[in-house]
Amino acid sequence: MKTEPVDADFLTQIDLDRLPRHIAIIMDGNGRWAKRRRLPRISGHRAGIRAVRQAVEACARLGVPYLTLYAFSVENWKRPHTEIKLLMGLLREYLKKEINELNRQNIRLEVIGRIQALPKPVLQDLQNAIDQTRQNTGLHLVLALNYGARAELVDAVNALLAQSKRNGSITVDESLLGEHLYTRGLPDPDLLIRTSGELRLSNFLLWQVAYAELWVTETLWPDFTQKDLFQAIIDFQKRERRYGGLGMS
């Protein structure tokens, strides 16, 4: 992973004792980035991989425990077949090229979503990368693939119904439902970043981001750098987190 040098001033503004435990990112703007340059959309997706490296490197460098990237949504299947095929090819390319670097940086790869619906070669490469990084104890890099928050909630409810049929009546509360989400075992995001200036969640982690701080930038994803991520963390640390409390100010 080759990353750009970062102004030391950014690092001095970050309180390493108050880092967000879990950062989630909606990586948006690849297509617009390519269109502005009169390039094919795949060029935007390929440029987006460089931004992925920037974000992963920055989180690993700081010691952020969890980073979740919205890589491919359930709605993305509506895109042209050619584009989907190229996206899957880029994903496989990333997994094969970055595995050694992930291990060098002690990064553990995980995946959430309806991954069994992904093409078999993609599944095989994913499983290989997961297996090869399983023992790493640093950053948890979570890829949301064939992911949709509504689909996740439907799958959780169906799992609970199946459990009820097997074991009899059950009492569903937030804790039990959380144990049946794709993200079970992961802390909820503290900070949700969205690029390209769009002000919507796009069916991403709807349950989990209930109390997350939102940070939106006009920067298109391929132009997102470590400086952008550091700025998001700096702004996050300036906020007063109330977790639903209205406060009296």
Image: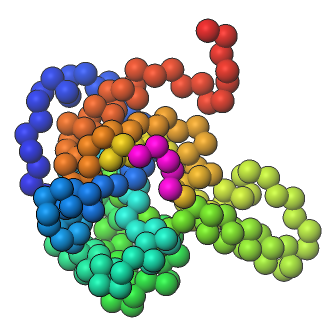
Q: Main secondary structure of the magenta part?
A: loop
Is residue 52 depicted above or below 161 in this figure?
Answer: above
| Residue occupying the point 63% across, 64% down | 150
Is residue 249 depicted above or below 7 in this figure?
Answer: above
The reply to whether residue 46 is visible in this rendering is no
In terms of image quadrants, where is residue 126?
bottom left
The reply to whether residue 166 is visible in this rendering is yes
Which color scheme did the rendering employ for the protein? Answer: rainbow
| Residue occupying the point 34% across, 47% down | 195
- Residue 102 picture location, percent across and down: 23, 62
- Residue 180 picture location, percent across and down: 66, 65
| Residue occupying the point 11% across, 49% down | 3
- Residue 76 picture location, percent across and down: 43, 72
Instruction: From the viewer's side, name the closer residue of 138 and 179.
Output: 179
In terms of image quadrants, where is residue 215?
top left
Instruction: State which region is magenta.
Output: 198-202
| Residue occupying the point 79% across, 52% down | 173
Q: Is residue 41 left or right of residue 120?
A: left
Please give the count of numbered marks on the rendered protein. Answer: 0
Q: Is residue 42 left or right of residue 139?
A: left
In terms of image quadrants, where is residue 141?
bottom left
Instruction: From the viewer's side, name the closer residue of 186 and 218.
Output: 218
Q: Residue furthest top?
A: 249
Residue 83 magenta-highlighted: no
Q: Quadrant of the C terminus?
A: top right
Is residue 220 depicted above or below 179 in this figure?
Answer: above
Q: Residue furthest bottom?
A: 120
- Residue 81 picture location, percent across and down: 35, 85
Q: Quadrant of the N terminus?
A: bottom left
